[in-house]
Amino acid sequence: MSSLPFESDYIKTVNSFSELTTTLFEGKNNALCWQRNLDGDFEEIVSQLILENDITEVSAEDLEFLNLSENGNKARQIILNDMKLLTEFGALPSLNLLKCYERDDELGFISTDVYSWHVDRSPIGTDTYLCTYHGASSDILPNDEAVQKIVVPEIREALKKLHVGAENEFETFLVDHFFDLHYQEKPHAKSINLGKHSLWRLAVDHPDQAVLPSIHRAPKENQGEYRLMLIC
């Protein structure tokens, strides 16, 4: 398989699910991509699913219930196999039909929703796996092209005004409210779109992690189009 055009110190490609799950992150590398060109009609699946609220979790049974064409069935079998691979690996995959995520931008100067550049954190050793089958796909940002929002002077000062408590509790306040997980892109930063069909593994911030966590964000949805993505 040829390398992705954006393969870099941060992003590496692999050739199988086994390689995706066993390759160690090292150095600057904190994103792995199992690049795939999938054959199937994922739009047909989306057209038959029923959205409840803004996000609906779709089960394997929901997929099996759909009456699909040959190409739609190909897409269904691909998704079911991805769910099976991840489950057997020990993950808890969630297939989501998405209109949009909830926004959290009430403060104006900082947000803590998934549309903001952010990293994932876990108390245990884990990674984020995701694949977009239909609709807009997520973006990632090289770590050296972003800065933590809480160190931006004007944002930090605004957060200090928001904080109620002792000065030595301020850093704990930032962590408790997830402000420390969010980033601001530097001038001229170049984000990378994850595209459709490829299965990605992104490094998460946890005590045993050997590399920096991957900075990513949810995309702005295409008008009138739902997203179908697998994540765990």
Image (cartoon, rainbow, N blue to C red):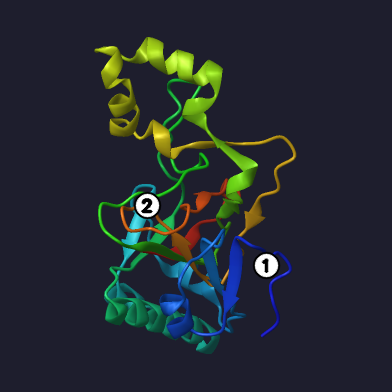
Instruction: Single out the mark in the foreground, 1 or 2.
Output: 1
Name the residue type under label 1: Glu
Q: Is residue 68 visible?
A: no
Q: Residues within 10 Å of mark 1 (few under 14, many from 20)?
A: some
Split into 4 quadrants, where in the image is the C terminus?
bottom left
Return the disc, 1 or 2, that comes first in the chain's sequence: 1
Q: Residue at x 50, y 20 (%)?
A: 155
Height in image: 230 above or below 141? below
Locate residue 74, reporting x and y percent: 50, 86
Split into 4 quadrants, where in the image is the N terminus?
bottom right
Q: In this view, does 189 lie to the left or right of 22?
A: right
Q: Which residue is drawn at 50% across and 65% down?
A: 26
Q: What element carries label 2?
A: strand
Q: Nearer the viewer, residue 68 or 201?
A: 201
Q: Name the residue under label 2.
A: 55
Q: In which quarter of the image is residue 177?
A: top left
Name the residue type under label 2: Ile
Q: Residue at x 67, y 67 (%)?
A: 7
Residues under numbered marks 1 and 2 in contact, where contact means CB atoms less than 8 Å apart: no
> Total label count?
2
Q: Is residue 170 left or right of residue 49?
A: left
Locate residue 186, reporting x and y percent: 66, 36
Q: Can residue 85 be seen in this view?
A: yes
Q: Name the residue under label 1.
A: 7
Q: Name the mark on residue 134.
A: none
Q: Is residue 176 left or right of residue 219?
A: left
Locate residue 132, reporting x and y percent: 51, 65
Q: Residue at x 49, y 81 (%)?
A: 75
